[in-house]
Image (spheres, rainbow, N blue to C red):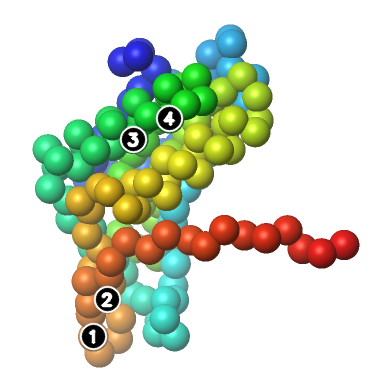
Amino acid sequence: MADRIFVEITEAPLDPAPLVRFAEAAEMGAVVTFSGNVRNHNRGRTVEYLEYDAYRPMAEKQLRQIAEEAVQQWNCRIAIQHRVGRLEIGDPSVIVVAACAHRGAAFEACRFAIDTLKERVPIWKREVWEGGEAWIEGERDAPVAAPEA
């Protein structure tokens, strides 16, 4: 299973290309990539930058456990990388790449990984805006409904 998983917490800028190359394999017909980027607004405020911090030993252990669960459930290859330190607007803070035989499973594995990461991994985000700052709890997106026809 170890050859199907790559996880890392890093200070370096994130690049999805090496993660996609890791996840791709001849038996994998679908590769889904998620990139969570620093946006310029949140909760009605203009964000200047973010700072991420993590308890690395536990964070990487949790990332690996999430990846193992995904591999077992969807028979995929998965790469998860999260950045720590100061990030500017537009910088990727997290990248998840899931490769599976079919697209449905790849989307499900990728969604599982990012949602579960937000719930379980000890990574903290400090949001800085003009005149203030706050540590923000991990937020899980609500499921998105398809538009009515």
Residue 43, above or below 149:
below
Q: Which mark is residue 48?
A: none
Q: Nearer the viewer, residue 7 or 101?
A: 101
Kind of residue at disc 1 = Gly
What residue is shown with label 4? 70
Q: Nearer the viewer, mark 4 or mark 1?
A: 4
Q: Give percent across and percent down for residue 18.
A: 42, 27
Kind of residue at disc 4 = Ala
Q: Nearer the viewer, mark 3 or mark 2?
A: 3
Q: Nearer the viewer, mark 3 or mark 1?
A: 3
**Label 2 environment density (alpha carbons within 10 Å; few <14, some 14–19, many ≥20):** some
Is the residue under label 4 in contact with that under label 3 (CB below 8 Å)? yes
Is the residue under label 1 in contact with that under label 2 (CB below 8 Å)? yes
Question: Which SS class for mark 1?
Answer: strand
Tell me which label, 3 or 1, sits earlier in the chain.
Answer: 3
Is residue 20 shown to the viewer in this render? no
What residue is shown with label 3? 66
Left or right position of 48 against 123: right
Report how many numbered discs are placed on residues in the image: 4
Q: Nearer the viewer, mark 2 or mark 4?
A: 4
Cα–Cα gap, marks 3 and 1: 34 Å
Residue at image point 51% right, 25% down = 74
What residue is shown with label 1? 132
Question: Which SS class for mark 4?
Answer: helix
Left or right position of 128 against 90: left
Residue 50: image quadrant is: bottom left
